[in-house]
Amino acid sequence: MANSRQVRTTDTSSSANVGELDGMRVAILAETLYEDMELWYPYYRLREAGADVFVVGSGSAETYQSKRGYPVTVDAEADTVTASQFDAVIIPGGYSPDHMRRHPGMVKLVREAYEQGKIVAAICHAGWMLASANILKGRTATSFRSIKDDMVNAGANWVDREVVRDGTLVTSRSPADLPAFMRTIVAALRERRTAERPERQVALAG
């Protein structure tokens, strides 16, 4: 852990939980030169909805500067967490995905989240991480246009849309698409929470 926050399973049984995403745990990946809006818009939108949001770094630093010099301090390093601890993994763009993909722990987290049926969301240049995680084959996805060839070469059916959801994979093109990107992620998390609620209640009753 990069600081005192801990990733743990949240008890959603309390009537005090009123947010639509209370009990959901989301990792937002961070590395140097991230795109400001693509990290902070999801961060605050998900917190507003009640989700527990963790910024996960590669381990190369505890604080990363954005493209515009705004810092983010990580809550955990990729090598210290597992995909099973989260309901979703969100990957911002900017120049950071080119740094993320050099760290096996970051790529492993994305790949295992996808394999475990968690929501994996990538915007702009974050499609590079999906390619490195080898999870694009046969999937319909979008990205910033300049990495279209990389997406196609990784096996994606690339389309030019503001947001694409293919199962648990959510992708968007640019900061201008953030409203649609987040509406889709929140909807996917709501579906996941609804599907898991009976299972969690049974576990609590047992």
Image (cartoon, rainbow, N blue to C red):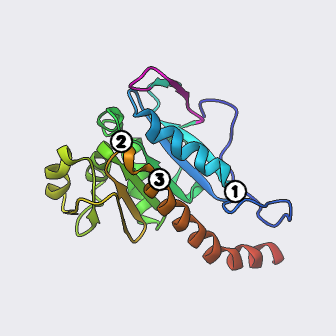
Question: Residue 133's spot in the image, x, y percent?
Answer: 31, 52
Whole-percent x, y for residue 69 in the image: 45, 20
Q: Say above or below: 22 vs 39.
A: below
Residue that carries the numbered disc 1 in the rendered image = 9
**Residue to which mark 2 is pinned:** 104
Location of the N terminus by quadrant is top right
Quadrant in which residue 187 is drawn: bottom right
Indicate the amino acid at tag 3.
Pro
Dot 2: few (<14), some (14–19), or many (≥20) neighbours within 10 Å? some
- Which residue occupies the foreground of this view, 53 or 81? 53
Query: How far is mark 1 from mark 3, CA to CA?
Result: 28 Å
Question: Is 41 within the magenta?
Answer: no
Return the mark for residue 68.
none
Mark pair 1, 2: CA separation = 25 Å
Q: Which residues are magenta?
A: 66-75
* Alpha carbon distance from label 3 to label 2: 30 Å
The residue under label 2 is which amino acid type? Pro
Residue 33 figure quarter: top left
How many numbered badges does the structure rendering display? 3
| Residue drawn at point x = 40 percent, y = 27 percent | 32
| Spot occupied by residue 13 in the image (x, y as percentages of width and height) | 81, 67
Residue 199: image quadrant is: bottom right
- Is residue 192 rendered to the left or right of residue 162? right
Disc 1 packing (10 Å; few <14; some 14–19; many ≥20): few
Does the image show residue 61? Answer: no
Label 3: state its secondary structure. Answer: helix
Q: Nearer the viewer, mark 1 or mark 3?
A: 3
Q: Is residue 71 magenta?
A: yes
Which numbered dot is residue 179? Answer: 3
Q: Secondary structure at mark 2?
A: helix
